[in-house]
Image (cartoon, rainbow, N blue to C red):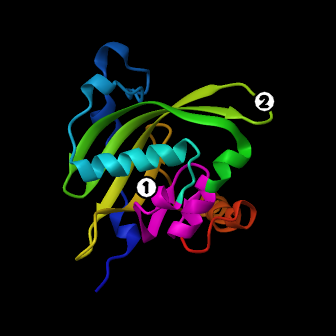
Amino acid sequence: MASHPESHEPNPDPQGLTSNPPHNSSSGVDYTPHPEKSISISPRRESIVKSICSLYSGSASEEDMSVYAEKAIYDDPWSYCDTRYKIAGQWYGIPKVMASSRTLATEIVSSTDKEVVFKLRQEYTPRVLHYSKPVNSLVSLALVDSPGEEERVAYHKDMWNQEDYSHEGLGKVFKTLNGDQLTKITRPPETL
């Protein structure tokens, strides 16, 4: 019996994973990456994190997309995608709306049998405004490995604050519509 991607949803403890007592914000979380504090991970997981950061930076390559399982889920405040192809719609959109997007820093804060969690500082420069804005987030990657295959991302959650996401009501409808429809605009390769 195959497992459902939803069952892989990461639910990280932002306060426990990100607290930095001398510099805490009022929320008790600090999503600012401190690369020197990063924990070690396996070479395969390093490769996965590198591919994910490349996607955030606008690579939109099939090679980087291959770190996702075919039925993977991507979940952030704007989108909910339930296949690798729909996830590609998000990543293939970055170069269309951003003049640049670059990873400034990462910090691996947790690595368990089934998950990698890292802080990410990404700088976005929209095409229209040409004003750069760094954004910190907590990225959780639930991982699965199938017999004879490498470990892949089953669920990618990008948290922008300490609150976990609701998967109910109008917010869920909006996120799902965005995930379902963006591929019509960004046109990722059908082979994904």
Can residue 156 be seen here? yes
Left/right of residue 162 with respect to residue 118 in the rendered view: right
Are the residues at dot 2 and dot 1 in contact (C-beta closer than 8 Å)? no
Q: What residue is at 28 percent from the left and 63 percent from the top?
A: 151
Residue at 61%, 74% (x, y): give it. 190
Q: Does the magenta stretch include residue 42?
A: no
The CA distance from mark 2 to mark 1 is: 28 Å
User: x, y percentage for residue 71?
Assistant: 45, 73
> Can see residue 82?
no
Q: Position of residue 63 (x, y in %)?
A: 47, 59
In the image, residue 140 sits, relative to residue 8, either above or below, namely: above
Q: Tell me the mark number nearer the camera, choosing from 2 and 1.
A: 2
The magenta stretch spans residue 67: yes
How would you rate the neighbour count of disc 1 (Cα within 10 Å): few for under 14, some for 14-19, many for 20 or more? many
Mark number displayed over residue 156: 1
Q: Mark 2 points at which residue?
A: 129
**In the rendered image, the vertical position of residue 37 relative to residue 146, given as above or below:** above
Query: Which of 14/150 is in front?
Result: 150
Amino acid at circle 1: His
Quadrant in the rendering for residue 29:
top left
From this view, report whether residue 122 is shown above or below residue 61: above
Residue sticking out furthest to the right: 128
Q: Earlier in the sequence, mark 2 or mark 1?
A: 2
Q: Is 106 placed left or right of 184 in the picture? A: left
Dot 2 surroundings within 10 Å: few (below 14), some, or many (20 or more)? few
Q: What residue type is labelled 2?
A: Leu
Quarter containing the C terminus: bottom right
Q: What residue is drawn where x is 69% and y is 40%?
A: 98
What's drawn in magenta, residue-wise? 62-91
Residue extending farthest to the bottom is: 1
Coordinates of residue 140 in the picture (x, y in percent)? 37, 49
Element type where label 2 sits in the image: loop
